[in-house]
Amino acid sequence: MISLGRVVKWLAQHAQSLGVEVYSGFAATEVLYDEQDRVIGIATGDMGVARDGRPTSAFAPGVELCGKYTVFAEGARGHLGRELIQHFSLAEGRDPVSFSIGLKEVWEVDPSHAKPGLVVHTAGWPMQDDAFGGGFLYQMEDNRLSVGFVIGLDYGNPWLSPFEEFQRWKTHPAIRAHLEGGRRIAYGARAINNGLPGSLPKTVVPGGALVGCDAGYLNAARIKGSHAAIKTGMLAAEAAHQALAEGRSHDVLAAYPAAFENSWLAKELQASRNFKLWFKRGNAIGTVMTCVEQWLLPGLGIRTPPWTLRNPHPDHLSLRRADACEPIAYPKPDGRLSFDRPSSVYQSGVHHEDNQPVHLKMHKDGVPVEVNQRVFAGPESRYCPAGVYEFLKDEAGESRRQINAQNCIHCKTCDIKDPTQNIVWTAPQGGDGPGYDSM
Ligand code: SF4
């Protein structure tokens, strides 16, 4: 059991020792194309831009980083990956993508509770039957453990709060027993793909490729995607290496998707392709059919189920009207096992320079109050794990939505779940964001 954040740092050192240059502290904000519409690299964002969009005395323009091939590996719902998918219509004919939100904490526990290597996976409680959820607890060394809860973003009740469900989940006796007497040292959240092979877009464009969760590679049944990210990164790298050896540049790395189709990863993802889609039909059906597909059929020598389910619609369309749903009363945090959002955000180590343009953009200004609040009771004030969105009344009694962008922990959930797709997540200035040191 290890911290993925630390693995990534270790990998970076290893890459640097081989001569790779790693630039941290800069976000890629723009895809660069040439006149033939081939990807030729990325541009980083400008630094030192004030909240009103004007340059400050610290202004420094972004830089262009160009290459013969550009590989995009931004994680789920990457903001440049999303642009590439739209620009080149990579998802044409594919099912809509399906996402979950994962919330996680790292704890330092009482040494008497430490059992390094222990894995606990849960499903169901405290979720109601119309929403998918499951938890994990991994015991690491040094008396540390990570706990987390994952909720499908196709839930329908706008009163649901993934953050509060996670806090409630920790109070279950089977989880509480590991945490009692310990202290929380880190918090974070991130949207995750649900690993539907039927939703995978084309992964190559002239001069570029999508890998890992940026494309949507994940095995939801096994609750893991890091192995898929590493494998697809390797396959793209091998294709690029071969192309460079042949003196090519800026063309389509067709060898990468071909190698994926012949890989163990493609077989593995096909074997669990229906996992999330069964749970869309209820926890009982999901549990039974997972047993059938993951244990019964393989026991009979059938590794891949002979049927394929389809994802009917994107997650944001599953939200129901608030007045047609039961409000959910969540228990108050006790400050020992369960916490509120402000103290959690503090533990994410998030930092954003105050004087910069708001990085959460709106297509239309009136929608937050007219649709989000009036029809759906402001679901972003509940699904955002960092309390970024608040509905307030001004002096005239008019509602308005306030965006506390400095709290954003870059989970991308608002970009996915907003009912009218009015919110667009863009990269803030420089390397601003959460500081996930031990996550
Ligand atoms: S504002 Fe959006 S991206 Fe940022 S933490 Fe909230 S839901 Fe996640």
Image: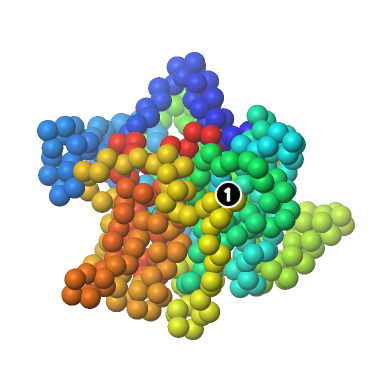
Name which quarter of the figure residue 381 lies in: bottom left
Q: Who is closer to the viewer here, 205 or 275?
A: 275
Asked where in the image residue 360 lies, by quadrant, the reply is bottom left
Task: Find residue 68 and report its image quarter.
Answer: top left
In this view, 296 is above or below 2: below
Element under disc 1:
loop
Residue at image x 18%, y 41%?
49
Residue 91, placed above or below residue 349 = below
Does residue 232 appear anywhere in the picture?
Answer: no
User: What quarter of the picture does the C terminus occupy?
Assistant: top right
The residue depicted at 45 percent of the width and 83 percent of the height is 323
The answer to whether 216 is drawn above or below residue 251 in the figure is below
Residue at label 1? 336
Give coordinates of residue 117: x percent, y percent: 73, 36
- Does any portion of residue 312 appear in the rendered image? yes
x and y, in percent, of residue 119 in the image = 73, 44
Badge 1 amino acid = Arg
Residue 102 in picture, x, y percent from top left: 55, 52
Image quarter of the N terminus:
top right
